[in-house]
Amino acid sequence: MQAVLPDLDEAGVLAAIDRGTDAGGPTGRHWTLDPIDGTKGFLRGDQYAVALALVEDGEVVLGVLGCPNLPHDAARPDGGRGCLFAASRGAGAAMRTLDDPAFRPVHVTRTADPAGARFCESVEKAHSSQSDSARVAALLGITEPPYRIDSQCKYAAVARGDADIYLRLPTRKDYVERIWDHAAGYAVITEAGGRVSDVRGEPLDFSLGRGLEANKGVVVTNGLLHDAVVDAVRSVLGL
């Protein structure tokens, strides 16, 4: 913060942080920020994201994902790294590298056959049921190994076509997803042409405050595969 506001002293920094107490909800305008999304990935020197989103009257209208370690091109993992994704409602999604200010549009894949799809999921087993994901993949006829990366970089991967599906399946019944873990990615993927729902096919409800209290788990796809993937998820989870 002091890099942007160099005259801010310690008390000023703490006062600014204390302003981040908005409870969210169905009315008003507020930002949601996760400064290090994917803490374990960050500690490993692997994938993490800085995720910022603007919510207006319970709707996500803008999202930005900074992915400092994400390869510029997934087909060249040893090449340049560091990507920034941005999306605003009705304006599409775009990506730039951290060393080039020029944005280019990004779009999801056109994969329509689930058997030809690739899915990604969390590295950490505590974040998503990998065993259930494997059963979903088998039901859909997917044979390619999952692409496991940390943080909302998974949303970015689907948005630019590195993968077709992202599954975050519940690991326990009482777990509530937090809006800062999904809002920015939600904006990017939907503006790139994809779809997002919970495991029952219900839209994510950002109007209830800091938690996605009305939802269970998250399913992200290129849109064309969404209904088939949700059907498979519901079958595996017994919904």
Image: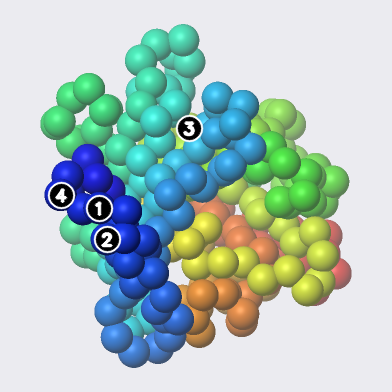
Q: Nearer the viewer, mark 3 or mark 2?
A: 2
Location of residue 199 in the rendering, given as x and y in whole percent from the top left corner: 67, 66
Asked if residue 100 is positioned above or below residue 41 in the image, the reply reads above
Cβ atoms under marks 4 and 1 closer than 8 Å? yes
173 sits left or right of 189 in the view: right
Q: CA distance from mark 4 to mark 3?
A: 42 Å
Residue of label 2: 12
Q: Is residue 105 visible?
A: no
Q: Which residue is mark 1?
A: 9
The three-letter code of the residue at mark 4 reads: Asp
Reply above or below: 113 against 82.
below
Which comes sooner in the sequence, label 3 or label 2? 2
Where does residue 119 sit, x and y in percent of width and height?
62, 40
Marks 1 and 3 sit apart, C-alpha to C-alpha, by 43 Å
Instruction: Establish if 55 lies above or below 114.
Output: below
Numbered circles on residues, count: 4
Q: Nearer the viewer, residue 111 or 52?
A: 52
Q: Which residue corresponds to the image point at 71% horizontal and 29% vertical from the top-left? A: 145
Mark pair 4, 1: CA separation: 6 Å
